[in-house]
Image (cartoon, rainbow, N blue to C red):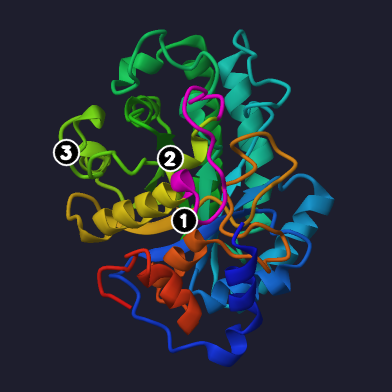
């Protein structure tokens, strides 16, 4: 886990940091932080140092204790110039009580979600403006017709698809009504994954409002460029997503290699999560390669890239336990992926950290 080199880097950071490099184009760089951990001050300081200026958080705004912690973390982050996008959930979200209530009255669903969403927006709109309608809906159980690729709207005309359309309609209308009443520049994000672009079309047809497209992708080193890969359709995922004529936030990004050996790729060798090991190093090359494609492409209006996620969640199962930019919640043990993120964002890198990138041939398009 690079205990020697990286630990030494951290220890000497204040003494040997060099001026920040220029951020690569106008993209905003950030990271998923869920609830922000137990020390938002330390977190905000680390992110600001690396010029990671946006975060994606979970919002359970009808839980008073959670809301208080969320608002506290948001205030600390805002004070460091870090903006927030939040995922809004409902009782129909995956894992929640009515997730598979497929015989529900859809008018009742829309109304109840509207009523539960609106106060959450009213209580947080002073600290943030971007709200995402649930998380990874395209992966919900039974939402897609069996055997369909997910590239067409009709692929989602299922009982689960219709249920979630009612959920998202209620959510988006609540945000829109608060936006109109308050005059705040609130934005609604509707996200998808892989090549499930039909979900966006289907929800659009069902009256779901959205201003921004969110997208999750974990490409492998051997995958073709994101503005070319034909598996996603003509012009790759970026061209496909550009057809919705909205800003694009790639709000979950990391290497596909992290999933190697996990449930989705059980026959592949396990990701070691350790610097110097072959699959881990391939993952670092993958991140560098595909970020350069995102920065250099002209197919889509990519306004932000957010890594998933801030630190390893060791209590979770493979591969969810190893997506972090840090090995630890105390943020004392950064990974090479954090250094890559900082290099693209124009954040502080020590001379030793720059050497870690340069010896691997990993540099942003503008160089170090």
Dot in front, 3 or 2: 2
Q: Mark 1 falls on what kind of element?
A: strand
Residue with the mark numbered 2: 256
In the image, which residues are magenta?
A: 262-280
Q: Are marks 3 and 2 in contact (CB under 8 Å)?
A: no
Is 24 covered by the magenta stretch?
no
Q: Nearer the viewer, residue 222 or 50?
A: 222
Q: Nearer the viewer, residue 334 or 43?
A: 334
Residue with the mark numbered 3: 235
Q: How far apart are the two marked residues, 3 and 2, measured between alpha carbons?
A: 20 Å
Whichever of labels 3 and 1 marks the residue nearer the N terminus, that label is 3
Q: Mark 3 falls on what kind of element?
A: loop
Question: In the image, what residue occupies the spot 57% across and 52% down?
Answer: 274
Q: Residues within 10 Å of mark 3 (few under 14, many from 20)?
A: some
Q: Quadrant of residue 359?
A: bottom left
Q: How far apart are the two marked residues, 2 and 1, measured between alpha carbons?
A: 15 Å
Whichever of labels 3 and 2 marks the residue nearer the N terminus, that label is 3
Question: In the image, what residue occupies the spot 71% across and 60% down?
Answer: 329
Q: Quadrant of residue 197?
A: top left
Q: Nearer the viewer, residue 365 or 164?
A: 365
Q: Nearer the viewer, residue 84 or 180?
A: 84
Left/right placement of residue 205 relative to residue 167 reads left
Q: Mark 2 falls on what kind of element?
A: helix
Dot in front, 2 or 1: 2
- Magenta span: chief secondary structure: loop
- Where does the image place residue 283, in percent across and percent down from the top left? 43, 48
Q: Are marks 2 and 1 in contact (CB under 8 Å)?
A: no
- Where does the image place residue 117, in percent across and percent down from the top left? 64, 41
Question: In the image, what residue occupies the spot 61% across and 7% down?
Answer: 103
Residue with the mark numbered 1: 306
- Where does the image place residue 194, in percent across and percent down from the top left? 37, 32
* Residue 181 in sight here: no
């Amino acid at each position: 886990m690079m205990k020697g080199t990286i630990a030494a880097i951290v220890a000497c950071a204040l003494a040997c940091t060099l001026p920040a490099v220029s951020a690569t184009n106008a993209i905003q760089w950030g990271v998923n932080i869920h609830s922000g951990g137990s020390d938002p001050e330390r977190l905000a300081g680390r992110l600001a140092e690396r010029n990671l200026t946006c975060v994606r958080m979970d919002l359970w705004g009808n839980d008073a204790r959670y809301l208080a912690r969320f608002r506290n973390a948001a205030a600390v982050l805002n004070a460091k110039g870090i903006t927030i996008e939040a995922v809004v959930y409902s009782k129909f979200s995956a894992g929640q009580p009515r997730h598979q209530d497929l015989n529900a009255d859809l008018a009742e669903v829309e109304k109840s979600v509207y009523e539960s969403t609106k106060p959450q927006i009213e209580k947080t709109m002073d600290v943030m403006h971007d709200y995402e309608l649930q998380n990874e809906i395209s992966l919900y159980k039974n939402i897609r017709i069996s055997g369909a690729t997910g590239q067409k709207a009709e692929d989602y005309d299922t009982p689960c698809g219709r249920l979630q359309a009612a959920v998202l309609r209620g959510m988006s209308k609540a945000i829109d009504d608060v936006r109109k009443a308050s005059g705040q520049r609130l934005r609604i994000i509707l996200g998808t994954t892989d090549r499930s672009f039909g979900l966006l079309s289907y929800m659009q047809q069902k009256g779901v409002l959205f201003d921004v497209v969110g997208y999750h992708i974990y490409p492998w080193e051997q995958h073709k460029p994101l503005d070319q890969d034909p598996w996603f359709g003509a012009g790759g995922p970026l061209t496909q997503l550009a057809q919705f004529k909205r800003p694009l936030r790639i709000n979950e990004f990391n290497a596909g290699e992290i999933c190697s050996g996990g449930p989705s790729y059980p026959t592949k060798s396990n990701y070691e999560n350790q610097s110097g090991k072959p699959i881990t190093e391939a993952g670092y090359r993958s991140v560098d390669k595909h970020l350069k494609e995102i920065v250099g492409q002209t197919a889509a209006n990519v306004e932000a890239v957010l890594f998933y996620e801030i630190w390893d969640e060791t209590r979770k199962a493979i591969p969810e336990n190893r997506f972090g930019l840090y090995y630890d919640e105390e943020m004392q043990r950064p990974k090479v992926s954090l250094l890559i993120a900082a290099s693209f964002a124009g954040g502080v890198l020590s001379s030793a950290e720059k050497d870690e990138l340069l010896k691997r041939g990993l540099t942003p398009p503008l160089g170090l």
